[in-house]
Structures are given as structure tokens and as C-alpha cells.
Image: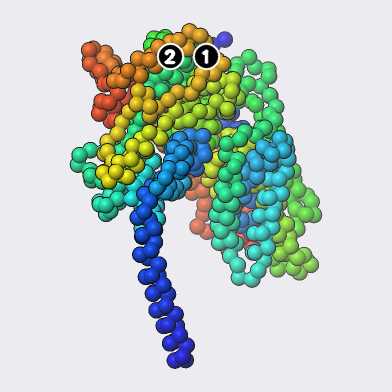
Amino acid sequence: MTARSFSRRHLLAGAGALSLAALPSGRARAAGALTVGFIYVGPKDDYGYNQAHAQAAKALKGMPGLEVIEEERVPETNAVEKTMESMINLDGATLLFPTSFGYYSPYLLTQAKKNPKIQFRHCGGLWTEKDPKNAGSYFGYIAQGQYLNGIVAAHASKSKKIGFVGAKPIPQVLNNINAFLLGAQSVEPSITCQVIFTGEWSLAVKEAEATNALIDGGADVITCHVDSPKVVVETASRRGAFVCGYHVDQSPLAPQKYLTGAEWNWLPIYEDFIAAMQAGKGPQNFVRGGLADGYVKMSPYGPGVSEVARKNADAVKAEMMKGGYAIIKGPLKDNTGKEILAAGTAYPEKAAELESTRYLVAGVKGSV
Amino acid sequence: MSDDLGLWSVLLAVIGGAIRVSTPFLFVSLGETITERSGRINLGLEGILVFGAMSAYGTAVLTNSPWAGVAVAALSGAAFGLLHGFVCRLPRVNDVAVGIALMLFGSGLAFFLGKPFIQPSAPPLPAIPLGFWSSLPQVRAALQVNVLFLAGAFLSLVLWWAFRNTKAGLIVRVVGDSADAARAMGYDVDRVRLYATATGGALAGIGGAYLSLSYPGSWNEGVSSGQGLMAVALVIFARWNPLACFGAALLFGGAGALGPALQSVGVSQGYYLYYAAPYVLTLALLIATSSPDRALAGAPGELSLSK
């Protein structure tokens, strides 16, 4: 009996010593290279939001002195805090990119306060001076891409009704809806846009139902802001409607019906952050940019885009490439008749007001 | 003819939605009816549904034949059902717990094996254009009826008849109502339940094939969004009656289409509430038909949930 308890104690002591011995060497290994952690809310090959980030992460993997770790399908609950903690404590990550909107508050902010030496950069959140200095946010003005989508859509639409499948009525989604319609109205002022919210970032059946409902309502060009546009693109093209893509190029899913699409290009942002870290500085806290900065790009035009539409969109795109383009400009009313902007005023691309959009512009059918 | 149907379009969308969305509910609930009628609960059908969706899509991508996909989904569903039935015949095993384990196992395995199939497109299952008589595109779209929906409707009729009028149906019912009586009659209770669970699993697998090969018609990890679980609840709601399962599946499908359809005609306030319609409906009907004095009418006597 005594012998057995002795040996058990020996075993425990041995295991403790072993783990103590292993700990410093693990730290030392991580200290040599910069470890960057990416956290995605869905699968990283979803033809959508997560894939756009994962493409950039994949491109980073070849960089010397850099280790990229990823975790997918992390829900927007305190599960993401556990993921962040394990990336920090077990993998030695010092720069984290939790990419989904709902990760920011309170989960990322809590972890940023707990780990002051770790840098957190969030995609889409609104970082302000009051937030921890080791946190930050980055985002692209993809509404510019949706504006160009709208121009092309207006040229392709016969019914003068276009449709938008939205996930949740948050500022980024509302900006996209507004831009899609305003782009279309710049071509044809009478055009209207029906919006249907599904309530979740990824709900395949509801997205298909929403697309069908839009087309039944007469819309003949559809775009969306959900995490994985695959279902919307396929359903719309099966019903014979044109589609504009979002997040990444979905043209292989509907080669005939795909007009163009608004795509992300996250790589330059990540490269800048990593370069700053490797130079021993803190990366920027607040990064925003659009087409002109190379954070957003457009899919190649599909066969359904006419020559006139092509020229029109290219001309506006050339204007946007100069920087400072304003989509939201006065006089502008929302769809309840309230004035948003008076004549002569505008929110150019870097205006902070765009990040707290709470309205749908006149001509959008739907409510926030 | 105007393209704008106004409020009629809501009714049309609900009918169309009922036809489009109900099929997975129908197959899973028919499968669960067979399983529960034999006295066992298989909560793992959600996992089987997801795995069925993945295996059907993967097979269709690789072989270019959607029907091969349906067959593989049914076979894999049956295999999962056999696994459940086999584990549950061991002594002191709780079928509810095994079901939950199977649900997580099936979904996890499907996510793992399904990674390479998220991107490619698979050939869809054929649909029959029953709306050919109408000049309205909305009507024609709503009445694009998939063959699996018709097969499911036919199957519910056959099962309803078979439970009453065939020997096999009678054996399943006896086993489900009183294991002792079945043993006294010389039937192997565990074997009947094993086969019933396997059949239930096969049907749930076919339901999954519909999800990935017909509507919404693509494989991703969120494709089921809990429909398998809802279908299990639907069986209780339908009182273990295959015909009622068909009606309940239509009701759930139609209620799910209500939210998007109402938004499309301008009723856009409170869409979260409309999205909750199927669940509210279930709760209301269950409360309305429940009684503190007796067990659920029609419940198999051996079911651990009514014991």
C-alpha cells in the first residue's frame, strides 16, 4: 500500500518536473517568430466573408519569420474568448485577428484589457480612443463596390426592381443596401430596392427563401450581405435572375447570370500590421480604406453586362480611385421621409458617421 | 397581367415555401415515427440529416449523379441508425443520451469529411413543373415540385396504411407498446428496434440529400440549421401518425416561408417574431392538446419519454 502511494507521488512529481522543463522551451520557440492568430465565425472556404480573410491568411503563410494559426467556426459568444486565450497562452500568438463583427464587444475588449501585451485587431468594429490601446479595428469601404454593383444592376434590370438579402441590420449591411440602391438610382432614378433580412449570418434555407421571395416580388437583380453568398447566387441564377456578388468572386457558381461583385482584399492591411509588429512598433489602431487603398476590388464583368453599363461603371470607378468619394450626399432622405443630409453636405468615404448608419435611404423597401 | 400580386404573393410564397422547405422535415419525421413506434427515441437524426446532406452532395459531385447521392445518403443514414440501434440494445444504455452523442458525431464527421465539397457545384435533383398551366412566373416557381417531395407524400400514405394493415406494421407497434407482450408472442424486440432505427436513419439520410441536392441545394455546414431536431419534435406534435407528419411538415415549411414573404410585401417590422412562428405554433398546439391526467394520446407505451 505504502509502496504504491510512493510511486504515485513519484509519478506526479516527475510529470510536474517534465512540464516545467517543457514550458520555457515552448516560450522560446514562439519568441523567435511572430505568431498571428486568425479567428473565423464560419468555415474558411465558404465562398464568402471567411474565405476572403482566409485567402489573405494563406498568402501570409509563406512569409519568413511568421507563423499563422487559424480557428474556424468560432461562435460570437464567450467561446471566442476561450479561443483567444488558447491562441495567446498555448500558441504564443501576439497579434490576433478575430474577424467577425460580434467578437468585438465585449469579448475582444475584455481580452484586450486582460492581456495588455497582446495586440488585437478586429475587422469591422468601431475602435475609439476610449478603448484599450492594444486593440484596434480595420475595415474596407465595400459599399463603394456595392455602388458599382448597383450601377451595373440598373442597366441589367428590366423590372426596375432590385433585391437585397441582408443578414442583420447593422451599419455595414445598411451602408451596402443604401449604396446598392443609390448606385442603381444614379442610372435610373425610379428604381427601387427590396430588402429582406434573414436575422443570421448564415442560414441556408432562409437565404434561399428570401431570394425566392425577392424574385417573386418582381426583383430581377439580386445581391446580398450574408456570410456565404453561395446559396443566394445559386438560387437566383436558377430562377433566371441576375446576381451581383459579395465578399469574393462567385462567378464560377453562375457564369451566365453573374454581373460583377464587390470583393475584399485584406492582404495589404494584414501585411502592414505584421510589418509594424516585426519592426517592434504597435500596429495602427484604426484602419479604413476603399477601392483607392486597394482594400476593396471588383469581380470581372460577366457576359450579362452591356457595353454602356461597363463604361458607366468604369467611369465611376475611376472617380473612386482618386479617393474621398462620397456615396451618401445631400439632399438625401431616408425611407420614412426623414432628412439625412441637407443639400451641399456629404459623408465622404472616411466619414465616421458611416459607421453608425441607422437608416435606409428613400427607395429601399424594408425597415431597420 | 401584372407581375405585382400584392398580398396574394404572401399566400403563394407560403404554399411554395411549404412545398420547398417541408421535405426534410417530412423524411426525418417519418423516419422518427417508425423508430419511436418501435419504442425507441433517436435524437441523433439531426446528425444523420447533416451527414446525409454531405454524403449525398459529395457523391453527386464525384459521380455526377444526384440519384447516386440519394442512395449513398440513405445507406449512410441506415448505418448510423444501425449504430444507434446496436448501442441501445446493450444493457442499461439510455437511448436519448446515445442519440445526442450520435447527433454530435454525425455533424462533426460530416463537417470533417465535407470540407472539400463546400466549393464545387453538384447536379441537382430533378423537379416536376406542376405550374405549367399558369402564365405567372411566381406560380410556376412555387409549383416546381421536387420528386422527393412527392415520394415523401406517397411514403407517408403507405406508412399510415402499413402500420394498420400489415404484419410488419403490427409487429413494430406491438414491440413499441409492450415489449413483454412482443416477447410472449416470440418476437425479438431488440432486432425489431434495430431494423426500425436503421429504417428511420435511412429516411433521415434521404431528407439530408434533399437539403443539399434540391433546396437550398448546396452543401455547407449550416445547411440544416436544426431542422432535424425540429422534425423530432414534430413527431410528438403529429402524434406518431405518418399522415399527420405530412401535414405538420407542410405547416412548418409554410410557417418558415412567412417571414421572408411578409418582408417582401412591406411588412418589415418585427421579422424576428415571424421567424419564430413555427416554434410558437408548436408550443401553442402542444399546450392546447396536453393534459395532466393522461399520457399523450397515441404515444407508444415503451417510449422512454412517456414511461
Q: Which residue lies under the disc numbered 2?
A: A313
Q: Chain of mark 1?
A: A
Decide which of tag 2 and tag 1 comes sooner along the chain.
1
Please tell me whether residue B135 is drawn above or below residue A113 in the rendered image.
above
The residue type indicated by label 2 comes to: Ala
Dot 1: element? loop
Q: Quadrant of residue B268?
A: top left
Q: Which residue lies under the disc numbered 1?
A: A305
A108 left or right, relative to B108: left
The residue located at (38%, 33%) in the rendering is A268
Q: Between marks 2 and 1, how big is the CA–CA gap? A: 10 Å
| Disc 1 crowd, CA 10 A, few/some/many (<14, 14-19, 20+) | some
Q: Are marks 2 and 1 in contact (CB under 8 Å)?
A: yes
The residue located at (35%, 14%) in the rendering is A319
Dot 2: element? helix
| Residue A264 percent location from the top left of the image | 42, 30
